[in-house]
Image (cartoon, helix red, strand yellow):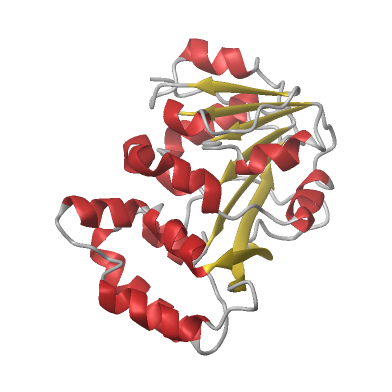
Amino acid sequence: MADLFLKQAKQYSETRPGYPQELFDFIAGKTTGHDLVWDVGTGSGQAAISLASIYTNVIGTDTSKKQLDFAPKLLNVRYICTSPNLSPSELEEIGTESSVDLVAVAQALHWFDNEIFYDQVKWILKKPNGVIAAWCYTIPEIDDQFDPIFRKFYSESKPYWDLLRGLVDDKYTSIKFPFEAVDGCNHTGPFEFQSKKLMSLDEFFTYIRSWSAYQTAKEKGVELLNDGVIEEFSRAWNGDENGQRCVTYPVYLRIGKVGNSVTIPHLA
């Protein structure tokens, strides 16, 4: 997974959307403690920024050191570059058994070996109310003129996406999620939120270039943003006086608590 973003880490950090405060407020309202968060697959720290404003300590882990280099440096956030198969010592560097209030996974759960990862989550979360919150965002939306053009472009890019991307397209409805509903909810989601970002067309193109599919296509000699696509997007953009549009990213959250499960972490 980390290799898919090596060549576009800077574009990723600059143009990927942040996440709405409503999302973090909802998650924080379901965690009984606010001391320690494990932000798994933190990338360039899009979620860590907001988590750090609510929780006392955040540990962000990722398998890509290049992505972590672009993450914001905050006093209560510690970043750790881990191996793809988290070792026992690496897990214990994050926390001891039943020590973490929240495991957060932003736009990354579909990349994980869930059986192994969920065993680690059940080991490290506080019992019984430690929370796991995993969310993804689907393709951006702008307006009725631009969206059909973009959806057609996205559909034509499908051959260059990893098959696991389908879990995102499915809004995480079909992803395995063996946790109990948090207090006040009768299911584990997905719950829908929206992330909004003002972008120029050039910034929107940079966002597309941050896709793993864009890099995969380029390596196969295919330019997804060819002259025809750029021209079509340009005609439909209709930006304000600064050339910007409000781009909406639908966000889908799965959230659950660990309960009293006793698990020996399945470690590599």
- Total marks placed: 0
Quadrant into which the C terminus falls: top left
Residue, far bottom: 145
**Front-most of 118 and 235?**
235
Which residue appears at 60% of the width and 71% of the height? 244
Image coords of residue 43 (percent x, y): 51, 37
Residue 3 lies left or right of residue 210; in this view the side is left
Image coords of residue 219 (percent x, y): 18, 50
**Could you say which quadrant of the image residue 128 lies in?**
top right
Q: In the picture shown, does residue 150 fall above or below 20?
A: below
**Residue 59 is at least partly visible in this image:** yes
Which residue appears at 61% of the width and 74% of the height? 245
Q: In the picture shown, does residue 130 fall above or below 136?
A: above
Residue 201 lies left or right of residue 184; in this view the side is left
Which residue appears at 83% of the width and 56% of the height? 184
Image coords of residue 221 (percent x, y): 14, 57
**Front-most of 102 and 57?**
57
**Could you say which quadrant of the image residue 209 lies in?**
bottom left
Residue 171 lies left or right of residue 153; in this view the side is right
**Front-most of 177 and 48?**
48
**Residue 1 is at least partly visible in this image:** no
Which residue appears at 58% of the width and 78% of the height? 239
Residue 8 lies left or right of residue 199; in this view the side is left
**Could you say which quadrant of the image residue 98 lies in?**
top right
